[in-house]
Amino acid sequence: MRAALVSAFLILAAILIIALIPTRKNLRKESPSISNDEVKRVKIVILVDNNAGEPGLRAAWGFSAFIEADGKKILFDTGPDPSTLKHNCQMLGINLSELDLVVLSHEHGDHTGGMAYVKEVAPGIPVYIPSNSPYLLDRLKKMGFDVRISEDPTELAPGIITTGSMRGPPMEQGLIIRVKGLGSILLTGCAHPGIETMALRTSNLTGKVFAVMGGFHLIGASKHRLEGIKNVFLELKVDKVFPMHCSGNTARAFFKKEMPNAYGDGHVGLAVEFSEGRSP
């Protein structure tokens, strides 16, 4: 009798554990308030990256992207320092004083170091950061920004959401733009939680993942790891892949060879536009 009770308890415990494990099916439940809104057009310009690109632009270890989606202007990360961000914005003709908001992927300096320039041109602007980032939170508050923590997936504007905070370490969030007729564009700073994990969450939140862009955190990654990521991208039917920043040359070469029709050469100055019936 006792053995039967123990066996039944173990079975019940196993069922509860399995029920709590995140899956592609139940991750959708994380954010019931996320709408099905989409944007008609989005343009993404890479302001900072360590992969050299257009002449006259400064390459630096870090990442920053400017997003314009149906008139909404967003800065995703700011690179390592204000001077690089300012120089490249001036060269590319991008005026950050027109920003609606800033999204910071995580607290590392190569993604947040340019905030001093943002303070200069857009003081007090809303800045969305992941949870459990106390140093970054304190620093931004002292700079006078309207800091907002997006612990769960957060809708910033129609068709534009965060992945919510994901464990790396450090805690990190990605930015998702849902484009009518295409699917979702996922932007990542470093993808410390795993680029495949962030792509899967995007799929569970929004459905079709059309493109993945940004830092993939794959320097030194094994061939086995790269193959696993490729298989996830293929499973999700990702159409475009732009590995930048901390992705590393080996990973970039791998995706270029293994996914030639999807691969995009990401670098500072890259400008891509997504809309229904049009993509890079």
Image: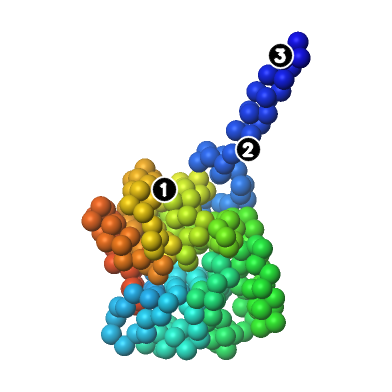
As drawn, 117 above or below 183: below
Estimate the spatial distance between the alpha carbons at disc 3 and disc 2, rounded to whole Å.
25 Å
Disc number at residue 113? none
Quickly name the residue at label 2: 20
Q: Is residue 214 visible?
A: no
As drawn, 260 above or below 80: above
Residue 217 locus on image (x, y percent): 43, 62
As drawn, 117 above or below 46: below
User: Which callout, 1 or 3, points to the residue nearer the camera?
Assistant: 3
Count of all numbered marks drawn on residues in the image = 3
Which residue lies at the image location 72% right of the left edge and 15% below the top edge?
3
| Side (left or right) of 251 relative to 12 | left
How crowded pointer 3 is (Cα within 10 Å; few <14, some 14-19, many 20+) is rated as: few
Q: Give the quadrant of residue 152.
A: bottom right
Quickly name the residue at label 3: 4
Amino acid on which disc 3 is placed: Ala
In which quadrant will I find the C terminus? Answer: bottom left
Which residue lies at the image location 48% right of the left edge and 66% below the top edge?
189
Q: Earlier in the sequence, mark 1 or mark 2?
A: 2
Residue 242 locus on image (x, y percent): 34, 63
Do the numbered discs 3 and 2 sit on residues whose CB atoms are within 8 Å?
no
Amino acid on which disc 1 is placed: Lys
Q: Helix or strand or loop: what does disc 2 sit on? A: helix
Q: Helix or strand or loop: what does disc 1 sit on? A: loop
Quickly name the residue at label 1: 208
| Side (left or right) of 140 relative to 268 | right
Q: Earlier in the sequence, mark 3 or mark 2?
A: 3
Which residue lies at the image location 26% right of the left edge and 53% below the top edge?
259
